[in-house]
Amino acid sequence: MRLPVAALACLAAAGLPGTARAQAGAECVTVECARSASADAPAAIRGLRDGVAAARAIKLEFEDAVRQFALDRTAPAGDDPVARGRQVSAMADALARWDGAVQAVEAAARPHLRAAEAHLVLGTVYLDRHRTADAVRALTEAARIEPERPEVLASLATAFVLAAKPAEAARQLRAAARLDPRNAAIAYRLAQSLYAAGRGDEAGPALQQFTRLRSGAPLPAAASRGKPEAPFERAGLFPQAAGIAPLFAPARYAAAFTRLESGDYAAAIEQLAAAAEAEGPVADEHRRGLESWVAGDHNSALRELQRAVELRPGDERPRLALAFVLRQAGRPSEAERELRDAIAAFPQAGLPWYRLGQLLESQARLPDAARAFEESLARAPMLGRDGLYQRLARLRVNQADFDAAIAAYAARVSINPNSAEAHRSLGEIYYLQGRDEEALAEFHAAVWLDPNDARALAALGKVHLRAGRYAEALPVLRRAVALDAARADTRYALGQAFARAGRPEDARRETAEFQRLDAEDRARGQREFRIEQERVESARLLAAGDVAAALDVLRRLAAEDPGNPRWLREQGAALLRARRLGEAVAMLEEAVARGAGVDGARLLADAYAAAGRAAEAAQHQARYEQAMRQARVEELLNLESGP
């Protein structure tokens, strides 16, 4: 296609490669000119985008430095001042290089500012750097130059989301949706922005458009395992991925991490440096307390940690460690008291609230646990928000508070929008509430993000089935069965869809398969219940001194479940109690060989000792103690996110 004369003049004036300077000094005075300029300047724009990639690589270095600093500060006894200073310096160095890379992009873009693409690239690099005002300015200019590019408006909406202006984000996405009505990601983001702006009554059409667009998309082949889709854009320093434990800033660093959250990185580093300089060493009593706990001496651990709390009232770590050891020692009420004292002493810290939520949840105090997790979320963990929202939502479901569960799952989707599992979980709550329109949209999003999610496909098919859309239900349910043929509920739904679609033979086949799977599930559940009852009975018999009867029960269980070393270990314990030492040793040796774990090693050491085989007893006792020490060390290494 030949370019208009005005476009050629614009390209020449911009000095972009591959164009003759037919009209040196000519001005680009029309939107059409600018659009043509950006479309026909691939080499220049490639150079700008290379600069964006370089800046983004340095951003990842900055993220790593911040993450490592936070991890070390939340470690139970990490207090190396040299490491603290080195980590702060690494942050400052990465930030300086990052800003230098941004300046390089700005300089490279300067000759091409008549092209919308240059402003789009600048907006991208500013978004990465959390310079929201600059990102809005650059992307607004790109939209002015090329007002018919929906991706520019979508990026501008992302900048407004980062600036906490959901109404502005919704306005840009509405304009983008008018330009590109077949863009499913824009339609979904528009609906979510309207919800966030408090205009949920306007979100319905956008959500319906998203559903229509995704309903028309073909399902990929069952064997398709390509790179997951990631159509939803989100800006921010740390991505919130699934499966990551929450990471909170310690109290003395909380203000600095709040600045990081807002994008004021330079001021945040200054605050971190000052707080790191003022941080005193961990008390010797704190270290000794942790060492005593690792060695299995709870009493000494508690005594030393209580002293550390007295000596370091401005450090929450001794209180958290004390609460942890109290909980491990079976003293939950005292652990709760210490956690509440930590909350009172350090109101800006999120970790005490999170630990309290864990403790309360373990005691089935669900409303109090949910409130504790909400308080921890209000203190903005750097990482792990996805899992924390998921945990909170499940608590709310267990309390039958579905509105609160929906709010938690929706928040989870907003921070991790490309998670198929997050969309599916939100859709399942909508489905339980009978809100089929919202459920349908979320299940479509889940299947889009992960076409091999059999559970999401089954849920999507069930929504169609409940609405009487049998033709739409059949292909997704059949795909769900192809991916996971063992789900009885999917087979049942598929049978229902076949029946209502007038295919009785197919319906009978699927219904028969459902009945078989359902019977297997019920039999498995009954078997597990019976095994547990028999295990309880064997323990009762053993406690009553009827070792022979207890052994009979345990032998039956071992014969029924021959691959499980648990029953060998239980038999060995019973034989040891009966002082049938030779049999006990043989049974426990086999149990340990089959992987009976640390309890098996402890029992075997006891059996050797009772049999007078001191050397072997000492050997296995040492192995048991080493395994227990290692387990406790691992718990301490993960102390910042709870056991």
Image (cartoon, grey):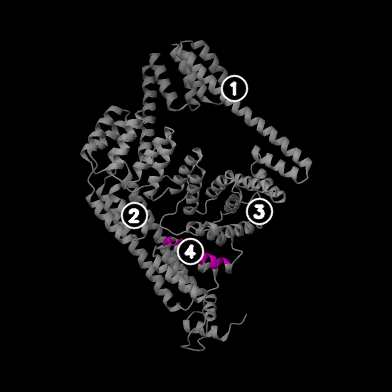
Circle 2 residues within 10 Å: few <14, some 14–19, many ≥20? some
Q: Amino acid at mark 2?
A: Thr
Up-down relation of residue 42 to residue 467 (above or below) = below
Residue 299 can be seen in this image: yes
Q: Nearer the viewer, mark 3 or mark 1?
A: 3
Residue for point 24% across, 37% down: 309
Question: Is residue 165 part of the magenta span, yes or no?
Answer: yes
Give the magenta range. Answer: 162-177
Choose the circle earlier in sequence order: 3 or 4. Answer: 4
Looking at the image, tell me whether mark 4 or mark 2 is earlier in sequence order.
4
Looking at the image, tell me whether mark 2 or mark 1 is earlier in sequence order.
2
Residue type for callout 4: Ala
- Residue, disc 1: 560
Between marks 4 and 1 in the image, the one whose residue lies nearer the viewer: 4
Label disc, if present, on residue 108 of the rendered structure: none
Q: Which residue is mark 2?
A: 258
Inter-mark Cα distance, 4 to 2:
23 Å
Q: Main secondary structure of the magenta part?
A: helix
Which residue is under mark 4?
169
- Front: mark 4 or 2: 4
| Left or right of 488 in this view: 164 | left
Q: Is residue 501 above or below residue 288?
A: below
Front disc: 2 or 1: 2
Tags 2 and 1 touching, CB below 8 Å:
no
Q: What SS does tag 2 mark?
A: helix
